[in-house]
Image: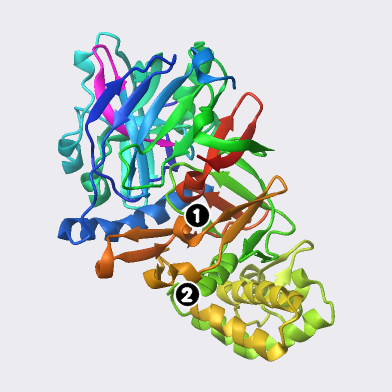
Amino acid sequence: MGTSFKVVVLPLFLSSLLLSLVSSAPNDGLFRIGLKKVKLDPNNRVAAELESKNVEALRASMRKYHLPAKLEDSGDIDIVPLKNYLDAQYYGEIAIGTPPQTFTVIFDTGSANLWVPSSKCHFSVACYFHANYKSGKSSTYKKNGTSASIQYGTGAISGFYSNDNVQVGDIVVENQDFIEATSEPGLTFLAAKFDGLLGLGFQEISVGNAVPVWYNMIEQGLIKEPLFSFWLNRNAQEEEGGEIVFGGVDPNHFKGKHTYVPVTKKGYWQFDMGDVLIGGKPTGYCSGGCFAVADSGTSLLAGPTTVITMINQAIGAEGVVSQECKAVAQQYGQTIMNLLLAEARPDKVCSQIGLCTFDGTRSVSMGIESVVAKSNGKSSGILHDASCSACEMAVVWMKNQLGQNQTQDRILNYVNELCERMPSPMGQSAVDCGRLSSMPSVSFTIGGKVFKLTPNEYILKVGEGPQAQCISGFTNIDIPPPRGPLWILGDIFMGRYHTVFDSGNMRVGFAEAA
């Protein structure tokens, strides 16, 4: 390794409350760690303050993308039960060193490093409220010292690499490199009850190219099969939050058979995804294909603003009015309609009316071209990225409605309605809890199969009775081609569908959770 590494990765989401650990060892050849839960009081002022930080942490996490036999027959399978915090975050317990020092961590398939607070963290208040790794108390500690920095939206987790044994369930991984964090700035880390994070992504996204824990499980022959699986219990009232099974799957966690799709790009667990449906009707946005990532470290579902806006309109989510969107709809709406009716290529419409330029495969912002023209002494107005994006969204929306044989007046009104439902820049949209029964399903096409989510599954509900607050489980993230369009299928999706991460066959599998 070199001497210093920096990267923008890791997710930190809705903060969670630490629970005590209860160990058990049923006679089924597996090792289980039971976790308890504490329910958040939405009326608590501290909790409310933490909630206001959740969206900022969520948005920070998205930046990283800018970038089986029966259990009783399987001895080499390890199970780590998880804690469920109001359907928002899942975490479990590991131990580092000899004798073992215990830490609560988020198991994150969207990153690849293991980090915990260091006893040498003296100037970050957060370190005084979490368990700290003390290298001097471990007989298996090996010094490394290479510096590392992981950037978040609210600051950087920084520290240095060390090497020690890491225990996950009853598996002991020897000679594991991990980061001792010596700086944890920001309220997010202070308030969060998890101590650190254990990445389950590929080594390609590892800070400093450190070997991930699960790689060493396979290399050291500690698990039977090179795969792990997630079962997330979406019932926040139940004691058991879920389980990760290393080396196999638990047939009690799912129904039917898994639908498998190949991993198309190592780093994240990324695969190809088909169209998104609202109320059973295709949006058409991903009919030509989108990319998706299964990410246990993301609480919500993130996707292109174009489709998220359509979902917001369908479920009545309150977003932020986009003046640019409404201006484009008012000035160019009829022209866009006429071009689509004349069967113009949808990907060329916005360049034809002068809001974007066409690079041969798709429309792109005029901003760069305008700057070049200006540098050559040519006179041209600078057209902002927002106008091009608004036009492209209007094309998708209108094409969708034309496919449903709507009238022109209805389509233009629909586009204006969607402009009112543009997602908040901070990613959070509130909905009326009383309207859940009338909201449509939202479905994702994966491997040719439609995976449906109902309102009760994609809406996060905090509190009960008249004080309850409901938050849309959808937020926006826009990744342009060739890396996008990209969807991030977080815990909301993985809670509904048991997920298998199979590195041996380089695939991801989904089945209805039991």
- Left or right of 354? Residue 161 is left
Please indicate whether residue 496 sits to the left or right of residue 100 in the image.
Answer: right
Q: Residue at x 23, y 59 (%)?
A: 42
Which residue is at the front of the view, 510 or 269?
Answer: 510
The x and y percentages for residue 365 are: 64, 69
User: Which secondary structure class fits the magenta region best?
Assistant: strand
Q: Is residue 414 magenta?
A: no
Q: Residues within 10 Å of mark 2 (few under 14, many from 20)?
A: some
Magenta residues, start to end: 95-108
Q: Judge from the rendering whether residue 273 lies leftward or rightward of residue 145; answer left or right.
A: right
Q: Which mark is residue 316?
A: 2
Q: Position of residue 467 (x, y in %)?
A: 25, 68
Up/down of 426 relative to 232, above or below: below
Position of residue 51 relative to residue 93, above or below, is below
The residue that appears at 61% across and 90% down in the rendered structure is 330
- Which of labels 2 and 1 is toward the front? 2
- Say which of 335 and 153 sits in front: 335
**Residue 340 x, y percent position in the rendering:** 78, 79
Query: Amino acid type of disc 1?
Result: Leu
Name the residue rendered at 23%, 39% in the picture: 18
Q: Is residue 372 visible?
A: yes
Report the disc number at residue 301: 1
Secondary structure at numbered mark 1: strand
Q: Nearer the viewer, residue 130 or 511?
A: 511
The quadrant where residue 374 appears:
bottom right
- Give the Cα separation between the discs numbered 2 and 1: 17 Å
